[in-house]
Image (cartoon, rainbow, N blue to C red):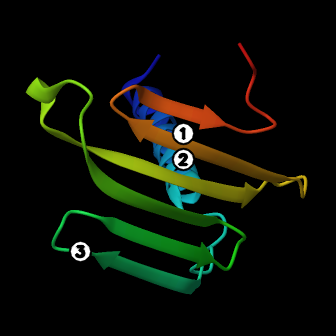
Amino acid sequence: MTRSMDVVKVKELCKDKENLVFFVVTLAVVTAMPQKLDEPIPILKQSSNISPEGAYEYSYETGNGIAADETGVLHKAANPEDGSVVVAEGRYSWTAPDGKLYSVTYKADENGFQVFGDHIPKK
């Protein structure tokens, strides 16, 4: 091979590499771009209240069907060494993509977190 043929092959190879680099960079940029900009979900209702004695309550509901509420009260623990414990009770619900409404209720106290819902397996 002559030197001029080597130069031509190197130029072609570089051109192919440039095309490959351009393609890879373009692919990376396109896949990194957000595919769909989601609209912000509005908060339809929201309330909260905290008392000086340690009790509280809150609730909210969003535009996409999520809702939650909880109340909490300070109680003396069954074991005097534990002092006071917060007993919290509440619920949350959401609508699944298939349109089914899921709802969970719960209680948390010195006995732990207990959760209930039709979709939650029973022991």
**Tag 1 near tag 2, CB within 8 Å:** yes
Which sits in the foreground, 88 or 68?
88
Q: Position of residue 55 (x, y in %)?
A: 29, 64
* Residue pointed to by mark 3: 51
N-term mark: 1 or 3: 1
As helix, strand or loop, the secondary structure at mark 3 comes to loop
Q: Position of residue 48 (x, y in %)?
A: 38, 78
Q: Is residue 58 above or below residue 96?
A: below
* Residue pointed to by mark 1: 16
Residue drawn 46% across the image and 44% down it: 21
Answer with the quarter of the image where residue 10 lies.
top left
Residue drawn 16% across the image and 73% down it: 52
Identify which amino acid the numbered label 2 is placed on.
Answer: Asn
- Image quadrant holding the C terminus, namely top right
Viewer-nearest of discs 1 and 3: 3
**Tag 1 near tag 3, CB within 8 Å:** no
